[in-house]
Amino acid sequence: MPCEVAARFLILYGSQRGQAQSIAEEIGQQAAEHGFTADISCLSNQHKYNVDHEIRPVVFVVSTTGDVDPPDTAQKFVRKIKNKSLAHDHFSHLRYALLALGDTNYANFCNGGKTIDSRLQQLGAKHFYATGHADDGTGLEVVVDPWIEGLWDALKKLFSSMSTSNQQGTDLRDCTQDNYHKNASGQEKNKSDLEVDLHLLKLSEVDSEKGKTITSDTSDVETLSTALVASLKQSVPTLSESVLNVPALPASYLEVHLEQGSTEREQNIAYQPGDAFDILCPNRASEVEELLLRLDLQTQNNCAVQVNLLKNSSKKAAKVPLHIPQNGSLQFILTWCLEIRSTPKKAFVRALADFTQNGSEKRRLLELCSKEGSADYNSFVRDANVCLLDLLRAFPSCLPPLSLLFEHLTKLQPRAYSAASSSLQHPGKVHFVFNVVEFPARPEHPARTGLCTGWLADHVSSILRPLGTVPASEHLGTSALPKVHVRPRPSSTFHLPADPSIPVVMVGPGTGVASFIGFLEQREKEREVNQEATFGETWLFFGCRHKDKDFLFREELERFAHNRILSHLIVCFSRDEPDAAGTLNSPTYVQHNLRLHAKNVASILLKDKGCLYVCGDAKNMAKDVNDTLLEIIGNELQIDKLDAMKIVAGLREEKRYLQDIWS
């Protein structure tokens, strides 16, 4: 191993909601255990690094925001490296590895990281380790954990090559590539195999110390046995009899002191139809109270909290989390600042084990965070949406200190909702639409509703009204209405075209129709103001389960259609009963109606240079609509799927195919 200075590398992260940052910090923390020194910086802090002249290896951790964009913190960096004046060998000196975070529920998986990766390659940079693509849809840790584990060997080999090269004056470019075009068993492989390696990471974990691969899958007999008797609280052989390979105990770095003692304003927020707002929702009061009781802190809920760094902590670059305010009350911090519903990562489970008194309970927590217990962790923690309180209920002898929660619980994130209104139509007001998310009871946790949607439902329950009756709010003063805290999200491109003569196609099943109500209200007002202007056609493809139960905004949409604000209202109902002839009166899903109107859709997009907007569920609907669009364009132009994909990519580039989707 070269000297300490030579074994220094740089970690750069681009994070939207903290996941990429957390992973980057975890890599930095583990670096010292493997004999490296890691410097870490957010991509937005360009004064702290200079990749144009960086001789250290660089590790990028980059998330994706929305469907296609790098996170806001990486936007300036992306613009810089996309400068067309840069030479093709601008980054020929750069040796890097990249971990991209994404969600396969979205059409452009890991596009934020892929954008940076491909551009660095175009400018001559070289991988020293295969790129990882982690999927939040199946669990980031499935790829992240083995990717990080393999990173250390890759860095050791790179530094060894750099040391040899410096001594012999050889060219690093060839030797680093030769070293890393090998698979886990040490066999030679070519460059095109790199991507295959990454997908293999989802199926196996590499035990670098023993030099062998341990597959995550168990035998059929073991799987059957686990399904019958294993649970969050207990394991079965062979896991219960295995020697465990558990992660290192995370270094403590905070100390918390509790000290005794201890305006609303109206806003006229400007927004455009298509914009979204963050709703700042608190944790459930009952869950906060239970957590305080469980930690034996219920009598100190109003104490002011002081958080400081431990003087003797071994955690590198430790800092007090910015989302924990100094001198805030304990009740406030647990209610508004920490995501107590988040699923504990393995490092948190490992730390909890050290504060568990009962031997069998401690063993089970160690199993859940171990390599050998990965399948159980996935089944009984991650897939079950288990939170800290669920673990504390299951393991009653676990008594963690408050500092441990502050170290491992992430920031309570706001929830985004699209505006279902136009400020031209409703000055000073914004409308939202939401479905209450429900999590049925499981052995691991009781039944509960989604954090924000359940909270909103509780707020509006007193003013809900049957369809067709007068809103209760008309009889109430503004002060009597429920209050929620909102803030505008960074501006998006999900807006109507500036030229009203451009035709638009809107696809919004379920609550996805919300943004389009704002679009249509906007067009209605624009027509009133400028009656001589030319307005393009507006098509809306809407779908829901039942016509009589959940046809959202039915009265408004039918009025828009009657007044020709909406040129074509195309609806479908997926769960309605067949008619007397045994057939449904309309297609089942929005993509079926798109096919029925394929000629019109193709003409609007290809001939009239119109825009297509898709809003709603990313997991199924958005993918199906995208596939249908490829089919429509392929059939209309008589081209194969690859060429159709290029045209669709062009529509995205031109901001004429826009998505506002969520998983």
Image (cartoon, helix red, strand yellow):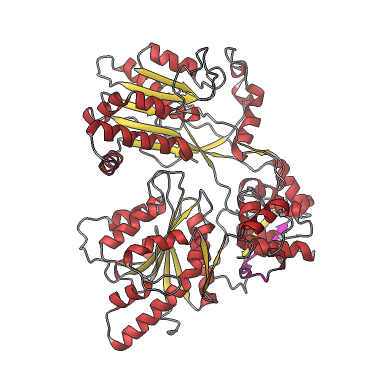
Percent across and percent down for residue 21 are: 49, 58
Residue located at (57% from left, 59% from top) = 217
Name the foreground residue: 259 vs 294: 294
Q: Which corner quadrant of the image does residue 327 belong to?
A: bottom right
The vertical placement of 435 against 36, above or below, is above
Of residues 572 and 248, the one drawn nearer to the viewer in this rendering: 572
Q: Is residue 336 left or right of residue 593?
A: right
Q: Residue 620's x, y, as percent?
A: 47, 37
Image x and y of residue 302, in percent? 73, 49
Q: Is residue 643 magenta?
A: no
The one of 378 and 431 positioned closer to us in this rendering: 378
**Which residue extends farthest front?**
221
Q: 193 or 290: which is nearer to us?
A: 193
327 lies left or right of 147: right
Decide: is 211 above or below 534: below
Q: Residue at x 45, y 66 (%)?
A: 40
Residue 1, image quadrant: bottom left
Residue drawn at x 55%, y 19% is 577
Residue 320 visible from this viewpoint: yes
In this rendering, the count of numbered labels is: 0
- Say if the magenta span includes residue 253: yes
Using the rendered image of the protein, determine whether residue 262 is visible from the camera's viewpoint: no
Q: Position of residue 208 (x, y in %)?
A: 51, 74
Is residue 351 placed above or below 576 in the rendered structure? below
For the stretch drawn in magenta, what is the main secondary structure?
Answer: loop
The span picked out in magenta is: 243-259
Q: Quadrant of residue 564?
A: top left
